[in-house]
Amino acid sequence: MSIRTVLGDVQGDRLGATDYHEHLFQVTPLLPGDELVDEDISRMEATLLGSAAIDAMIDATPIGLGRNPAGLARISATTGMHIVATTGCHRRAHYTVTTWVPELTVSQLAQRMIDDVVTGMPVRDESRTCEPANHDGAPIRAGVLKVGIDYWSIDDLGRRVIEAIGVAHDHTGAPVMVHLEHGSASFEVLEALNAVGVGSNAVALAHVDRNPDPVLHAELASLGAFLGYDGPARHREHPDSVVLACMQEAIERGAGDRILIGGDVARSTRYVSAGGMPGLAYLPRRFVPRMREVLGTAATERILVDNPRTYLDRFADVERG
């Protein structure tokens, strides 16, 4: 088994410390003026993250929101950062400009995801077929399937994407990331994914810590789901201490082998390389030392290294089907 990165498949023991949720390229009408489109700035920001002892990241930008596969590959090659790219779709609110994405059928969505994972992502996401991206003549492939759902709601688009993920996951074995709005509807989306053949142990629930309920998190982990903690530095919602205390209690309740940690900075105005703050490196420089102090070195290494490897290490030499 191996992990699918933008520069090819790597063995899990090569992944290292992993930030499970970031965006190096992203354009969405929900964040006007905060577009991530400058490759030089994104490369500098990834360099800062790497200098703070992070070896790998998932770029969680899905179809139609400014993905730049060739840019990801160049950044990975230049910085040495392992980057796992994402396919699938976000929630409908992100597609008021890229209106063709919500119009795709289940079959069309599934085929795009399968193509992204198996044969490679296109240079640009367009309604028509676009030429494939490549780096040094090799295809640039996605390694994660994504669906975004709204606050306590799985709308028609979300259900179509979930159904398509069922097809794509069956064909490729790729892991799944779910955007939870404010941490809501976690059990419901797991049930919907289970119904199309995606086991909970293949699913990471992003933003689960926006609802900092360690009892809930332990229950989700008991089903096999990975818990995406990406709330550090979001002090408008709650201080880092709340995230850390929730993580600590969730571990005490048995969820230690299911927690993932990420920054989800996702805005150019929050990139240090673009003159903003706190930057991608906030996670390893500010939050991870507190994890080590409170949780201990072994638990911290499990969250940074072992858990993301278990989540991502799902690709056989030949895809299924």
Image (spheres, grey):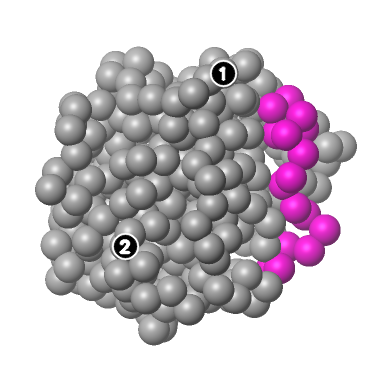
State the image coordinates of residue 110 (x, y, percent, origin top left).
32, 62
Measuring 56% from the left and 18% from the top, which residue is drawn there?
Answer: 77
Q: Main secondary structure of the magenta part?
A: loop
The amino acid on which the numbered mark 2 sits, given as a three-letter code, is Ala
Q: Nearer the viewer, residue 141 or 275?
A: 141
State the image coordinates of residue 246 (x, y, percent, origin top left).
41, 50
In the picture shown, does residue 264 fall above or below 110?
above
Q: Nearer the viewer, residue 228 or 63?
A: 63
In the picture shown, does residue 3 fall above or below 173?
above
Q: CA distance from mark 1 to mark 2?
A: 29 Å
State the image coordinates of residue 109 (x, y, percent, origin top left).
37, 65
Q: Is residue 261 visible?
A: no
Mark 1 lies on residue: 77
- Specify the segment rendered in magenta: 29-44
In the picture shown, does residue 297 fall above or below 157?
above
Where residue 2 sits, quadrant-wise, is: top left
Q: How many marks?
A: 2
Q: Nearer the viewer, residue 61 or 239?
A: 61
Mark 1 falls on what kind of element?
helix
Mark 2 lies on residue: 110
In the picture shown, does residue 253 fall above or below 4?
below
